[in-house]
Amino acid sequence: MTVLRTGSASDTGLVRSTNQDRSLETGTLFAVADGMGGHVGGEVASQIAIEVLERAFGSQPSSRGLTEAVESANLAVWEHSQDHPDLRGMGTTLTAAALVNEDGHDLLVLANVGDSRSYQFQDGRLTQISLDHSVAEEMVRSGELSPAEATVHPQRHILTRALGVTPDVVVDAWTVAPSSGDRYLLCSDGLTNELGNNQIAEILASRTDPQQAADTLVEAARRHGGNDNITVVVIDVLVGEDQAADAGPADQAAAAPSEGSSAGRASSGSPGTSEDGPDGISTALDATGIVPVVGRATGAMNPPPSSVRRQRRKSRATARRRERGRRLVTVRSLVFLVILAAILVGGYSAVRWFDVSSYYVGLDGNELMIYQGRTGGVLWYHPVVVERTGVTTGNIPSDPLTVRALRSGVQEPSYAAARAYVSGLVATEARTRTAAAFGADRPAPVVLPGKPTATLLGTAGTAGLAVDGGH
Ligand code: MN
């Protein structure tokens, strides 16, 4: 009888505006999902993945049930994105752990797709169980990059495998005998991007309570930058299977259902037979008794026949390209679009302001017009008629300079100034005529008819005409 004690914590971090991570912590099933894709897509994807995982595993609580539950979650996310065009391209990571009982043995089953991680913390030593499905980590596994190089590789966040991107997904799975005192950690990359393995191990060692450990991990990741959503689940094995049960997982692994690949290749399932491991990982894992489930684990840990591997590599390359494209679209081009939009809006506003903040008086036939804008227009902005004054060239001084100026447009800084200019012309002419007729210098009051077009103007309409010789 295995007894677990668990804790979990999740935080948006200091940079992101939403938390697209989701976690699950039930009595026997635990998971972390890190959603991605668009404004709400990430949240939707991780939420669906967790819900479907829980439901599907509930109806089949076995090691096979867990990997099939992950496959169900994958299909559910993918179908949802097909039904909702605005969510196309969303996806999520999913790393899960489940306690199952098979053939009378308790067994911890771990499954993973993406770059969220599962770790085992045993006797003060932290061992990563899951393999990141990211470009950089796969390059490390193939020897193209050193682990140190991988931590700063520009493509370290680009996934080669994710949940919900295609209708099918390859799920990595491992089984391990739960041993008293062992601690397991599930986490999103928001933790591992900020904290190194040593820092994580230190915290796990210093906090006995799993909830405290979870809280402290999240807090430490926030302090180290908090550049991403941070989610952790800590699972303590208080009472484990006795060591004699260790044969269980190996048997289980050998008997585990394999789907279309590497049938009978169970050698990596036996602790100690690590010579088949093409890299250091399986050796380390075998030493801890963690067993990749045959046919489910990645090619690196459990090489399938060459034909299968080639096929997988091809689809992986496709997925990688797709992933790369998708992430670039979501992040880089979003930034570009925002900047572009800012420039356009800024430019638009400046031009608009330059245009709108000016008026001029021009002629339409013989009638004096007040226009908003610049004479001749600015870029695609054409002047707008604000007011037909009703004043004709017959009402104003007929000197050729004035008329010529009006023909090309007399720029004024404001609507009120434009009206004042017209009024001034009328008043000058009226004064001239009055003087001519009566020899007096008292000008006739002149008021322009009509009201300005209100929609274009705020306060300018109240400026009115100041021409008033009498008062
Ligand atoms: Mn993340």
Image (cartoon, grey):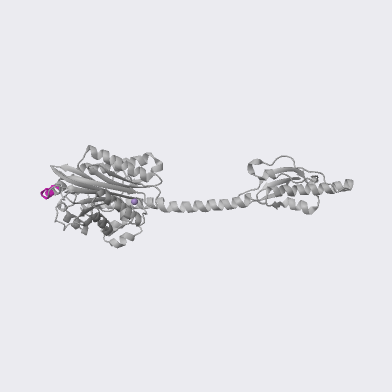
Residue 210 visible within the image:
yes
Q: Residue furthest top?
A: 59
> In which quadrant of the rendered image does the N terminus lie?
top left
Considering depth in this image, is 422 or 239 the residue closer to the camera? 239
Q: Is the magenta stretch mostly helix, strand or loop?
A: helix
Residue 96 visible within the image:
no
Q: Quadrant of residue 143?
A: bottom left
> In which quadrant of the rendered image does the C terminus lie?
top right
Relative to 406, 70 lies left or right: left
- Residue 11 x, y percent position in the rendering: 34, 49
Relative to 289, 212 lies left or right: right
Q: In which quarter of the image is residue 225?
A: bottom left
- Residue 88 x, y percent position in the rendering: 38, 44
Considering depth in this image, is 103 or 444 the residue closer to the camera? 444
Magenta-span inclusion, residue 89: no
Total label count? 0
- Residue 238 x, y percent position in the rendering: 18, 48
Relative to 438, 359 lies left or right: left
Magenta stretch: give its range.
243-248
- Residue 346 x, y percent position in the rendering: 54, 52
Q: From what the image shows, is residue 251 above or below residue 274?
A: above
Q: Residue furthest left?
A: 244
Considering depth in this image, is 137 or 107 the residue closer to the camera? 107
Magenta-span inclusion, residue 245: yes
Relative to 195, 388 lies left or right: right
Considering depth in this image, is 147 or 169 the residue closer to the camera? 147
- State the residue at coordinates (30%, 53%): 217
